[in-house]
Image: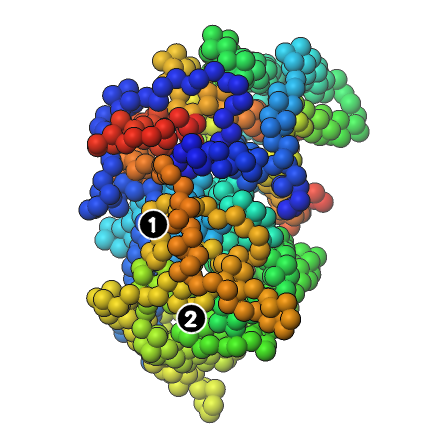
Amino acid sequence: MAIIEQPAPVGAPALPAAPTPTRTYGALRRPVATTGWKSWVFTVDHKKLGIMYGVVAMFFFIVGGIEALLIRLQLAAPNGKVLSADVYNQMFTMHATTMVFLFVMPMAAAFANYFIPLQIGARDVAFPRINAFGFWTLVGGGIIVNLSWFLGGAADGGWFMYAPNSGPVFSPSHGVDFWALGLQITGIASLTGAINLIVTVLNMRAPGMSLMKMPVFTWLQLVVQFLLLFAIPVITVALFLLSFQRNFGATFFDVSAGADPLLWQHLFWIFGHPEVYVLILPSFGIISEVLPVFSKKPLFGYPFVVFSGAAIGFVGWGVWAHHMFASGLGPVSVAVFSIATMAIAIPTGVKIVNWTMTLWGGKLRFTAAMHFAVGLIVLFTIGGLSGVTHSVAPSDTQQTDTYYIVAHFHYVLFGGAIFGLFAGFYYWWPKMFGKQLNERLGKANFWFMVIGMNLTFGPMHMIGLQGQPRRMYVWTEARAGEGFFNIAFWNMVASIGAFILAFGVLLFLINVFKTTRSKEVAPLDPWDARTLEWMTTSPPKEHNFDAIPTVHHLDEFFHRKYEQDPNTHEMKQVATAEDILREQEANADKHIHMPSPSYWPIVLAGGLPVIALGIIYSIPVAIVGAAIVVLALFGWSLEPSTAPDSDFDPPASGDGTKELAPLG
Amino acid sequence: MTTTTEAHADHAEHQDHAEHGMSIRGYVTIALILAALTALEVSTYFVDFGPFFMPVLLILMCVKFFIVVSYFMHLKFDNKLFSFMFYTGLFLAIGVYAAFLATFKFFTA
Amino acid sequence: MADTAVHHAEHGHHTSTGLSNNKLGMWLFLGSECLLFGGLISTYMIYRGRVGEGPRPGNVFDIPFTSVSSFVLLMSSLTMVLAVAAAQKRDDRGTTLWLTVTGLLGATFVGGQMYEFTAMYNEGLGYTTSLFGSAFYTLTGFHGVHVTVGIIMLFSLVAIIKRSNVPGDKAEVVELVGLYWHFVDIVWIIIFTLVYLIPA
Ligand code: HEM
Ligand SMILES: [Cu+2]
C-alpha cells in the first residue's frame, strides 16, 4: 500500500497514469534490491534506517569514549604529558560535540525511527524518503565535524564555542569552520527528522489509538521532536553568524569591533537548554516502557508523565540564561532565570515519583534492562539535585566553570540519557534482531558502568567545589591540597573510574558480538510486554503488521493477552503472543505496497558536505555541491514515493499505484 | 488535544470543501485592504504622526500579518491543528526573542 | 491496497487526523522558520545602532523605493492565491498563468533588492563595514534567498504542470508552494516595518 493514506478527492476525475521510469528524471530505474548493500544504502524502510542510525551512533560513542579516556589520562596526575594544551582543547571540544550531536541524539533517533511506527501501529513513517535523507545527512555532518582532525586540527573552543575563543585569533585552524558547518548539516537532519516524526505520530496512528492511548516512549519522543523543531533554527542562526564571521569577514562576535559577546551565548543557550531535554527525554521514554513491563503494572499516573513531559518541554524555553549567571546579566535577569530554573525541577520530580510508584508493589523482575532503568532513576536524581544547586545563582557563581558542573551534567547525561539508551538496548534487542542479549553479561555490563560512572563523576563534585576549573589542561601539585579533599587523589580515582566505565561498555560490545554469532532465537514475547511493537514477528516484517490493529486500550497488547477475571478482579492470561500473531496473519491485508527505495536521499544528502568543504576551501566546489543539491531536489520531486508497478522486476501485479503520492 | 483531533477527523471531508471558501472577489478585496494599509504605513515616512508613529506602525504590521495568514494562507478556515503548529512557533519566537532582547536592555535603554 | 483503502474508508478517515501529511509538514516547517527569522531580526535589532565609521540606517535606506518593492511582493501574494484557486478548479492554464505572474513579481522584488544592495554599497555600506551592515545584509539576504528559492519552485512547478508530470495531487502541491510563498511575504511585512520604517 502506499504508506501515505491521503483522501482520494471525492468524485475527482481519474488521475493521469503514474509516470513510468522513462518519464521520470531518475536517469536510472529506481533501486528495488531487497538484499545486499543496495538494499541498505537506498532503503527508505524506517527499521533499516533505525539500525543504521544505531550503528553510526555506536561508532561515534566509541570515538567520543576514546577522547574521554585521553582527557582522563591527561588529568590523572599533576602536570600531565599525554596531550599538549592545544590538543587537549580539541579533545574536550570534540568529546562533547561527538557525544551530544553524534551519539546521544542519533541513538535516540535510532529508537525513534525504529519504534515510533511500530508503537503506533503504522507501516512506516510519513515521509520515508525524508527519513533516509535525514540519516545520510547526519552521516555527512558527522564526517565534516570529524574531518578537521586530519586537516589541520579540530575545533577547540568548547562545545558551546564561546566568543572570542571561536574567533580566528584564538582558533586559527579550520577546526571551528568544520565544526560550524558540520553541525549545521546535522541540524538539517534533526529538523527534517522532527517534521517527519511529528507528522507520523499525528497522522499515522492505527485506528482507535487516540493521543492518550499512545505509549509513553512515543509521547516523549513527540515532545522531543517539537523541541528540535523550534530549537534547531536558533542554533542555525548562531552557526550561520559564526560561519559568516569566520569565512566572510563579518564581526558579529568580535568585541574589538563593537560586538556584544553575549549574543552568541544567548543564541547558543536558547538552543542549548531545550537541547538537554532533547537528550534526556527519549531515555525517560524508554524507561517508562521498561519499568511497567518488569514491574508487571501499568505506568503509575500515565497522564502525569505525559503532561509533565510536555511541561518540561515548554518551561525548558524559559531558563536558558542559567548558563550565564556569571556573565553580568544584571540582577533582574538573574532572578527571573534563577526562579524559572528552580521551577523546572518540579515536572522532573513528578516523573521520578511516577517511576518510583510504578515499582511500588510490583512483581519486579531484575533483568538487565530493568537494572539500567532503576540505575537511571537513582543517578539522574543525583544529577537533578546538583542542577538545583546551580539554579541558585549565588551558589552557581561559586560552581560555574568548575568540575562541579562537569559532575552535574555527567550524572544527568551519562547516568540519565545513556543509561536509558542501554535499557533500550537490552529491552528491544530481541525485537530488532530476534535474539536476546546475554543477561548475565548484561548485568556485568551494568555493574561496571555504575561503579565506573560513580567513581569517575562522583569525585568531580568534590574537586569542583575545591576549585579545580573546567577545561584546564593541567593541574599542579601545588593546588592539590591535603587530607580527604586532596584533589590529586580524587583525580586519580576519577581516571581509574573512567577505565572501569570503559570496560563496562566493552562488555556490551562483547555481548553484541556474542549474541550476533549465537543461533539461539528469542521467544516472540520474551518480557511479557505491553505495547504494539511486540505484536508482530521479531524482527518485524518489512510491512510491520500483517493487519493494522485496531486499538482499544493504552497498553493494547497487554490487554489482548490479559483480561480481568470478573469474580476475583485479577488479571488472567487469555491469549499468548503467538495466538495474537496467528490471528493477525490469518486476517492479513492483501496487496500491501510499501514505499520504494530511492537514490535521491543519499544524493541530496551527499551534496551538503561538498558545499561545506567548498565554503571552507574554494567557492567553486561549493557551487558544484549546490548543483548536486538542486539536481537531486528535482529528481526527488519528480519521483513518486511508491514505485509504479512497472518498476518492479518482474512487474508487481495489483492496483497499488493508483495512490496519491506524498512528497516525502 | 485528543478530543479536538478526533473530532476533526470526522469533519475532515466537509472541512475539505469549506477550506476553499473564499471567492476570487474576496481575495481581491483583501489585497486592496492590504494595499491601503501599506499606503498608510508608508505615509508615516512623509507625514509626522508624532507619538502615534510607533504604535501605528506596529499595529499595521500585525494587522497585515494576520490578514495574510488568516485569508491568503487559509488558517482561519483550515483545521485548527495547522494554526496550532504555526502559532506555537510564532508565539514561542516572540516570547523567547522578546526576553532575549530584554536582557540586552533593548526595550528600556 | 484496495482492501486497505476500504478498510480505512470504513473508519471514516485516511490519516488519523484526516489532514494531509504534506500540508501538516509544511506548517510545521513554517512554525520552525519563525524562530529562524526571529533570531536574525533580533540580531539586527541589537546591532542596528552599531554603525562604527560607516553610514547609519537612515542614510542608506531609500524608503520610497523599498515601499514599491514591498508592494510588489505583497501583490504577488494575491496572484499566488489566484493560482491556488485555479489549481483547485483544475484549471491548468489559469494555474500556470498565475504561477508565472507570481514568479515574475517575486523576481522583480529580488531585482529591486539587488539594486538596493548595490546602491547601499556605493554609499559606503559593505557587508563588513559595520555590525549594522553585517546584520542588515544577513537578515535581508536570508529573506532574499528564501524568495529566490520560492521563485525557483514556482517556475519549476509551471514546467512540471505543463508536462503534466506532477507526482501526487497537483492542487495540493500548488497550495504548499503557496503557503511557503505567503510566509516569505509575511516575513517581509515584518522586516519592512521593523527594519525600514522604524528608524534606529
Ligand atoms: C533538574 C533539572 C536541571 C537543572 C535545575 C539544571 C540546572 C543547570 C544549571 C543551572 C547549569 C549551569 C551551571 C553553570 O554552568 O554554572 C547546568 C549545566 C548543565 N546541565 Fe543542567 N540542569 C538540569 C537538568 C539537566 C539535564 C536533564 C541535562 C541533560 C540531559 C543537563 C545538562 C547540563 C549540561 C550539559 C550543562 C553544562 C553546560 C556547559 O556549560 O557545558 N541538565 N544545569
Ligand atoms: Cu540548562
- The residue carrying pointer 2 sits among few (fewer than 14), some (14 to 19) or many (20 or more) residues within 10 Å by Cα, namely many
Left or right side of A365 for B55: right
Q: Indicate yes or no: mark 1 CB to ligand 1 under 8 Å.
A: no
Q: Position of residue A599 (x, y in %)?
A: 27, 35
Residue toward you, A242 or A127: A127
The circle drawn on residue C86 is none
Label 2: chain letter:
A
Residue found at the very far bottom of the displayed protein: A483
In the picture of the structure, the residue carrying the numbered disc 2 is: A369
| Dot 2 amino acid type | Ala
| Dot 1 amino acid type | Lys
Question: Residue A335's image quarter?
Answer: bottom right
Q: Position of residue B58 (x, y in %)?
A: 71, 30
Task: State the separation of the CA atoms marked 2 and 1.
Answer: 24 Å
In the picture of the structure, the residue carrying the numbered disc 1 is: A541
Residue toward you, A157 or B88: B88
Q: Total of numbered circles in the picture?
A: 2
Residue found at the very far right of the displayed protein: B51
Per the image, label 1 sits on a secondary structure element best described as: loop
Label 1: chain letter:
A
Q: Indicate yes or no: mark 2 CB to ligand 1 under 8 Å.
A: no
Classify C112 as above or below C40: above
Left or right side of C88 for A46: left
Left or right side of C132 for B102: right
Tag 2 and tag 1, C-beta contact below 8 Å: no
Q: Name the residue rendered at 57%, 57% in the picture.
A: A554
